[in-house]
Every structure is written in structure tokens, then in C-alpha cells.
Image (spheres, rainbow, N blue to C red):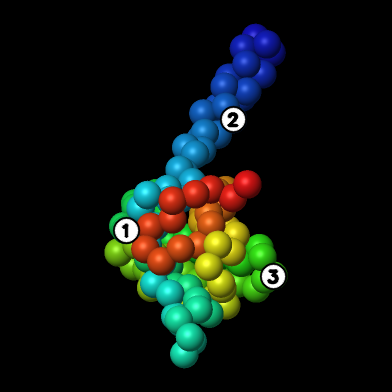
Amino acid sequence: MRRLVVLSVLLGFAGCVTPSIPIPPPDPSKMSFAVGTDGSGSIVSASLRYPSTTAYAGGLVYVFNRSKGKGIIELVNSDDSIGPTTPVEASASDQLVVSVESDEQTVSTCVLLQEGTPASYCP
């Protein structure tokens, strides 16, 4: 009888544990960077847009320029899209790490900056 009670309690606790479903990392083919330039046409900042993705609902987005050591943190929009973010200081081909954080996990992708959709991952 005692074993039955212990087994029932253990199974009850096991039923309370919900496995987390991994969120996908940001896909470079869905990213779009609007760049700001100086008078000579050199890139000086970048702002990210990313389409609505329900997996990112209620999350935080980080855009960190690994090359310059600067970045921003913002909330994912109420429609589950990202951006346009506050511009982050940047130059052409800088390494930008785009991270999305939910309550349980954080996923990241590093891309080389270019206007529009990035074509390359960080080396």
C-alpha cells in the first residue's frame, strides 16, 4: 500500500512538469536592417525589423554589435514582430548578434551587417 501511495505522488509531480518547447533562433533571411549613414555614405547605425513570430510573444530582443561592444534591449512588439528597433552604432560588415529571450530561454544569431537582409553569418 505504501508503495502505491509513493508511486501515485511521484506520478502526480511528473504530471506537473511541462516540457518547454524550444523557440527558433532569429532567421537571417527574415531580418531586415535599415542603416543610417553619414555625409560620405558610410554606415553609422543600424535598426532591425523582423516579422511577427508567435514564438517570440512577450519576449525581449537584444541587438548587440559585437564589433563595437554596443547594443540595445527592447520588448518584442505586441503583434509579436520586432522593430524597428532603436538604431545601434554600426559600420558595414560589423558582427551583430540578434537575441530573443522568452521566460525560459534565449536564442541568438550573429550576422554580418549590410543594408537590407544579411547574407552572411558571423565567422
| Residue visible at 43% across and 74% down in the picture | 35
Q: Quick one: label 2, few (<14), some, or many (20+) residues within 10 Å? A: few
Query: How far across and how far down the image is residue 13, in percent?
Result: 59, 30
Query: What's the CA distance linking mark 2 and mark 1?
Result: 38 Å
Q: Is residue 80 visible?
A: no
Q: Quick one: label 3, few (<14), some, or many (20+) residues within 10 Å? A: few
Query: How far across and how far down the image is residue 93, in percent?
Result: 55, 62
Mark 2 or mark 1: whose residue is earlier in sequence: 2
Type of the residue with mark 1: Pro
Are discs 3 and 1 less than 8 Å apart at CB? no
| Residue visible at 45% across and 43% down in the picture | 24
Of badges 3 and 1, the one in the foreground is 3
Quadrant of the rendered structure where residue 97 is? bottom right
Type of the residue with mark 3: Gly
- Residue 69's tag is 3
Q: Is residue 34 above or below residue 23?
A: below
Q: Which residue is mark 1?
A: 51
- Residue 34's tag is none
Q: Which residue is mark 2?
A: 13
Query: How far across and how far down the image is residue 46, in percent?
Result: 48, 73
Q: Quick one: label 1, few (<14), some, or many (20+) residues within 10 Å? A: few
